[in-house]
Image: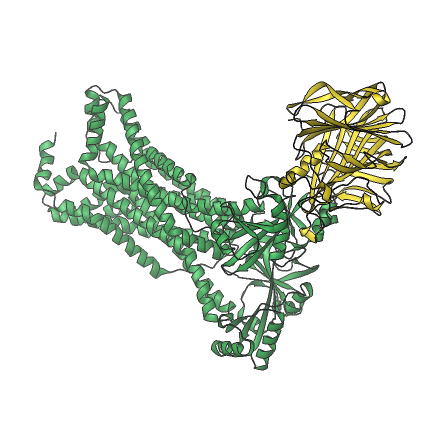
Chain colours: A green, B yellow
């Protein structure tokens, strides 16, 4: 009997290959987008974890310099002599022929737990690690290190572009004798430890977890991606839900027949569940494969973005990690289960002899409509509440979720009201029938329309955010990159020579001093600038006190970028410790878009007081043609041509980083919109098949099939247009949340919101085109429906 | 003191090979080798000998609290060289590690420290005497009068040590043979410290008095490959006399013993293989293995026939290279107390 039932179930798919395709394609698409995003996230996280595992970040507390990027080795020894169980770490960039490699040095004897790479089963003994010098790196990095005298050991678990070695070896490689970057604090400390302030007042303790700066910075980016993945999945599930609903609806007759023939209900349900499981696993499998390609396609861009934006190293190669392909399969099965649960429930409760006639989709009952409306109101209220409370990043994403789902739930109600209004205003019979029939179809189309609403709103929101960001960023680049050219030199003497040389030729030279540092415990760069009219004329402040530049120039104040001010909770007038015992009040906060780090600017003179050994590595030069400058410096100082960069090149590079950042977003946007178009197509196709009995009387009364087809097309366009109009305010609300809330929390800057009506119009047109395209095929099928089919409706009428 | 040698073996896996150059004065890796008839130069020889592979400053103390409770304290600093000589900063091939413990009749607290030489985190200077690793220290103007401190997550101690007698030399004037094949070390002791100080234990601070014993030993040779472990006794009798004895267990079941009798005045008499006997009388299960915690020790030449019993059988040193070390009570022909170290009990 099982065999017969299975054959009957399979026969449905054979007779409706389109439904079969819709089901598989919808679920596969949803799974593909979801698992693609998950694969990217998993790859990036694995890269961070590799970095964190080698550095002990995240697992152990750390002591970091309050200001500056290094601490003297003596401080480490003093702490140890005071009983503090800490372990030294030095970190720096080694420039090799193969590019920049981050060298991390640690002391295997004092690192807590299983942190050190030595001591495993490898043949590297402690002896050679400590004395000869051994560098651990992954295969790619190892090749680039080949020129070094130390022994290189390939270890795939080491983070990309990173080499791990003994602290002493690292100090020699980086030419930083007796200097350390930070200290790892062992979890167990002895009794009677003196307070940190007494032993090492220059250090501050950073708690585990928050110690991983990269994880912290990039967390928001991945949350973004995940949100997009979920959105795509939701759109995909709309498709599957629609298909499954239809399939089960159409099988009511078969179910009744099978049960009358004696198939027990329980077995039928179990078999249908098995069918659903097999199909969803198949679709999930296809989806995971597609997801792999999506991820492989996007990963290089994501990796470039993460490096450009956050300085995080992410390997560009994609690995098949169980975490994402398993989650892809799981979510396919879960999604199909969710979509099928309602339909199975209805079949389970179907009286054996009830009419098997399809109900042309369940008409939303009055009660259901009220429930839906209530839920929509509740979600929108929660969204408003979160917006007012201004909570953290996760809460803000919850806000986005509430806003989008609430609006989606409200959509059929609003459309229903609009259509009712249209009906009341309609003149003529055909007009009246058009509105009434559209209302009647609304429940069947509403899921597809919701998908369209979400996709379009996401498009409006994200494109508004990106374009606003872009405008602000270009404006900002113009302000920031005011020098005509930028010159890089080799050492202090040469830089001093170049400065004198250029000043003699009447050019304005703006040396820029910088050190990587920590300000208020936050990773930041401290800059020393020669304040002059050029800065005063060009830099724009987010907020500034009177005479901000004068006070900075006089060495009495500091200005910081917006992200540092927000992260440290400082604003005008607050004091900031800058290292070397220097504390200055905040005179201004400036916008610094695209920079993951905090930044503070003090005068050149002040900077040299704290860091007398730092020489400027870069000059801004005003008042000389870049080509002339390049030639002059090449002749006088034998500087290679690439050490002079003109303004336009820097701008192009910065914009390049910016564009790459949003490639992924744009790609996901397009995919989401495509999925929504697909949902509409499938809904219309399936509806058109069921609607024959409703259209036949209209045809019989004299409307030609061609007219009916045109009406169908117009209907799709009207519904899409209405949805698009509703999506616009939703999208703008989304953009506001992204700009004013997500950006502040994720990146540390708030962006002004610009509107782009032309873009919206283009998007609206695109949406209409998608809807029209989706409606064309069903309309054509309508126009070509054989007359006999229409007639048969009356013949079958009981 | 096998623990010390095992530690050394672990740090230098290659060193276990390449024997047989004893006569030349250095081994294959360039380390200096102990030679008979040593001439010590004090206080310089209280300091480190970086040309020897392994060296230690090993203090054990039997102490008593105000209520008569017995306590044991251990403070040990090891030096292990990856290569002979000293180097600048992190390049130094000298690795230091240390163990500290406090044993009470019902508890045993242990801590361990490891450090690189060359950067000031650990080291020893002979004049004034200072041996340190992190915040653990044995420091004084001379070795005769030192302050001993160490601590871990659950204990700390601070003890004053004052020598009441001379240094004593083991074996042949400080040349102590460790096997029939001739492995040897330089080995001398200060067994006459009087101690006063305090222990900071989970139950509170306890003022203590008692006596301590310092062992100094340095060598470049590991144990012979046929030796599986070591039982080492330092016993102080109520008469004022003391006995140092060890028993190196061979893999074939036999043992190599050696002993030094130390009179109350510091006069010594060394005993070669076989003069001392030590037989396990009762085992206890410690850290998942059977360890003999009661012994019968005899030295017929001195009419010694005593029972040596652990104050706390659970004195397991759960450090990188674990072993058993704790205070003991002595009864039988002579009464007294002392310390017992046992290694190689798998």
In the image, A771 versus A534, the foreground residue is A534
The residue under the point 58% across, 56% down is A92
* Location of residue A2 in the rendering, given as x and y in whole percent from the top left corner: 24, 22
For the view shown, which residue lies furthest in the front direction?
Answer: B23
The residue under the point 10% across, 38% down is A789
Quadrant containing the N terminus of chain B is top right
* Looking at the image, residue A3 lies above or below residue A293: above
Identify the image quadrant of residue A328: top left
* Location of residue B319 in the rendering, given as x and y in whole percent from the top left corner: 67, 34
What is the tally of numbered marks visible in this picture? 0
* Looking at the image, residue B303 lies above or below residue A49: above
Q: Is residue A408 visible?
A: no
For the view shown, which residue lies furthest in the right direction?
Answer: B265
Identify the image quadrant of residue A407: top left
In the image, A34 versus B39, the foreground residue is B39
* Location of residue A212 in the rendering, given as x and y in whole percent from the top left corner: 56, 47
In the image, A268 versus A257, the foreground residue is A268
* Looking at the image, residue A119 lies above or below residue A174: above
Drawn side of residue A606 relative to residue A716, left or right: right
Drawn side of residue B65 relative to residue A111, left or right: right
Quadrant containing the C terminus of chain B is top right
In the image, A501 versus A518, the foreground residue is A501
* Location of residue A698 in the rendering, given as x and y in whole percent from the top left corner: 13, 42
* Looking at the image, residue B207 lies above or below residue A542: above
Q: Is residue B84 visible?
A: yes
């Amino acid at each position: 009997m099982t065999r017969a039932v299975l054959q009957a179930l399979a026969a449905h798919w054979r007779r409706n290959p389109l439904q079969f395709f819709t089901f598989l394609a919808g679920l596969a698409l949803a799974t593909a987008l979801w698992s693609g995003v998950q694969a990217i996230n998993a790859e990036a996280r694995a890269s961070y974890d590799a970095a964190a595992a080698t550095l002990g970040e995240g697992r152990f507390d750390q002591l970091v310099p309050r200001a500056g990027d290094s601490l003297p080795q003596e401080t480490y020894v003093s702490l140890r002599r005071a009983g503090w169980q800490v372990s030294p770490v030095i970190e720096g960039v080694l420039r090799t022929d193969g590019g920049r490699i981050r060298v991390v040095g640690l002391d295997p004897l004092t690192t807590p737990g299983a942190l050190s790479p030595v001591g495993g089963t490898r043949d590297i003994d402690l002896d050679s690690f400590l004395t000869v010098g051994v560098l651990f790196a992954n295969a790619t990095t190892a090749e680039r290190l080949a020129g070094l005298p130390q022994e290189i050991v390939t270890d795939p678990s080491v983070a990309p572009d990173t080499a791990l070695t003994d602290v002493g070896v690292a100090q020699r490689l980086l030419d930083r004798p007796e200097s350390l970057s930070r200290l790892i604090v062992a979890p167990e400390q002895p009794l009677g430890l003196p307070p940190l302030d007494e032993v090492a007042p220059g250090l501050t303790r950073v708690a585990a977890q928050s110690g991983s700066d990269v994880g912290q910075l990039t967390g928001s980016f991945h949350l973004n991606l995940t949100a997009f993945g979920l959105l795509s999945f939701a759109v995909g599930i709309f498709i599957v839900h629609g298909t499954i609903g239809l399939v089960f609806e159409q099988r009511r007759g078969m179910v009744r027949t099978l049960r009358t023939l004696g198939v027990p209900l329980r077995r039928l349900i179990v078999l249908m569940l098995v069918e659903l499981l097999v199909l969803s696993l198949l679709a999930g499998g296809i989806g995971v494969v597609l997801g792999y390609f999506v991820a492989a396609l996007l990963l290089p861009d994501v990796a470039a973005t993460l490096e450009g934006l956050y300085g995080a190293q992410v390997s560009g190669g994609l690995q098949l990690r169980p975490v994402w392909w398993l989650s892809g399969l799981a979510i396919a099965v879960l999604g199909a289960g969710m979509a099928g649960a309602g339909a199975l429930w209805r079949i389970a409760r179907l009286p054996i002899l009830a009419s098997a006639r399809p109900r042309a989709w369940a008409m939303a009952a009055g009660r259901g409509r009220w429930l839906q409306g209530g839920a929509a109101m509740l979600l929108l209220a929660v969204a408003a509440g979160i917006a007012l409370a201004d909570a953290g990043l996760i809460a803000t994403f919850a806000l986005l979720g509430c806003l989008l789902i609430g609006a989606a739930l409200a959509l059929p109600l609003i459309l229903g009201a609009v259509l009712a209004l249209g009906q009341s205003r309609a003149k003529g019979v055909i007009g009246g029938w058009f509105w009434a029939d559209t209302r009647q179809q609304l429940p069947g189309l509403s899921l597809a329309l919701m998908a369209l609403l979400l996709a379009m709103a996401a498009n409006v929101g994200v494109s508004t955010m990106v374009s606003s960001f872009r405008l602000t960023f270009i404006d900002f680049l113009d302000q920031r990159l005011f020098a005509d050219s930028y010159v890089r030199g080799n050492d202090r003497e040469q830089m001093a020579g170049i400065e004198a040389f250029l000043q003699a030729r009447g050019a304005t030279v703006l040396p820029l001093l910088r050190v990587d540092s920590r300000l208020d415990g936050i990773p930041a760069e401290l800059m020393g600038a020669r304040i002059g009219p050029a800065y005063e004329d060009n830099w724009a402040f987010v907020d500034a006190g009177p005479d901000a530049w004068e006070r900075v120039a006089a060495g009495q104040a500091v200005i910081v970028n917006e992200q540092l001010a927000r992260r440290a909770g400082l604003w005008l007038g607050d004091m900031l410790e800058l290292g070397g015992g220097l504390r200055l009040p905040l005179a201004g906060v400036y916008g610094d878009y695209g920079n993951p780090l905090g930044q503070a600017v003090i005068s050149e003179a002040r900077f040299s007081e704290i860091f007398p050994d730092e020489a400027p590595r870069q000059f801004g030069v005003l008042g000389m043609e870049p080509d002339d400058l390049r030639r002059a410096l090449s002749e006088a100082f034998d500087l290679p041509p690439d050490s002079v960069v003109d303004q336009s090149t820097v701008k192009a590079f910065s914009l390049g980083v910016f564009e790459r950042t949003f490639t992924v977003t744009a790609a996901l946007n397009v995919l989401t919109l495509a999925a929504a178009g697909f949902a509409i197509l499938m809904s219309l196709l399936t509806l058109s098949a069921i609607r024959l009995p409703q259209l036949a009387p209209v045809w019989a009364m004299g409307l030609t099939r061609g007219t009916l087809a045109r009406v169908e097309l117009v209907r799709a366009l009207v519904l899409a247009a209405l949805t698009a109009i509703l999506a616009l305010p939703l999208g703008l609300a989304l953009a506001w949340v992204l700009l004013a809330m997500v950006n502040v929390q994720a990146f540390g800057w708030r962006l002004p919101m610009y509107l782009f009506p032309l873009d919206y119009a283009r998007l609206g047109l695109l949406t209409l085109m998608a809807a029209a395209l989706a409606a064309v095929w069903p309309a054509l099928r309508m126009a070509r429906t054989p007359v006999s089919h229409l007639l048969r409706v009356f013949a079958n009428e009981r | 003191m096998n623990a010390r040698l095992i530690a050394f073996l672990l740090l230098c896996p290659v060193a276990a090979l390449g024997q047989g150059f004893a006569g030349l004065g250095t081994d294959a890796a360039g380390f200096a080798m102990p030679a008979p008839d040593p001439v010590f130069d004090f206080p310089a020889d209280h300091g480190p000998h970086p040309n020897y592979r392994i060296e230690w400053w090993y203090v054990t103390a039997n102490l008593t609290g105000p209520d008569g409770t017995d306590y044991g304290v251990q403070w040990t600093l090891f030096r292990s060289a990856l290569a002979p000589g000293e180097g600048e900063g992190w390049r130094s091939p000298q690795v230091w590690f240390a163990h500290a413990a406090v044993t009470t009749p019902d508890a045993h607290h242990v801590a361990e420290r490891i450090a690189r030489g060359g950067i000031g985190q650990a080291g020893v200077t002979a004049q004034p005497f200072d041996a340190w690793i992190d915040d653990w220290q044995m420091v004084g103007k001379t070795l005769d009068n030192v302050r001993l401190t160490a601590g871990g997550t659950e204990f700390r101690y601070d003890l004053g040590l004052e020598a009441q007698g001379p240094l004593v030399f083991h074996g042949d004037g400080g040349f102590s043979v460790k096997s029939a094949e001739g492995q040897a070390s330089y080995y001398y002791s200060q067994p006459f410290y009087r101690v006063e100080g305090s222990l900071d234990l989970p139950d509170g601070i306890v003022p203590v008095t008692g006596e301590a014993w310092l062992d100094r030993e340095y060598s470049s040779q590991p144990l012979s490959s046929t030796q599986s472990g070591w039982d080492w006794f330092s016993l102080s009798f109520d008469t004022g006399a003391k006995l140092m004895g060890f028993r190196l267990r061979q893999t074939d079941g036999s043992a190599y013993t050696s002993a030094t009798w130390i009179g109350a005045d510091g006069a010594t008499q060394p005993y070669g293989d076989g003069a001392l006997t030590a037989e396990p009388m009762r085992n206890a299960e410690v850290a998942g293995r059977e360890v003999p915690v009661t012994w019968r020790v005899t030295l017929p030449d001195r009419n010694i026939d005593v029972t040596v019993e652990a104050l706390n059988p659970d004195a397991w040193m759960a450090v990188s290279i674990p072993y058993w070390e704790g205070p003991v009570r002595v009864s039988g022909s002579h009464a007294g107390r002392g310390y017992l170290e046992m290694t190689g009990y798998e």
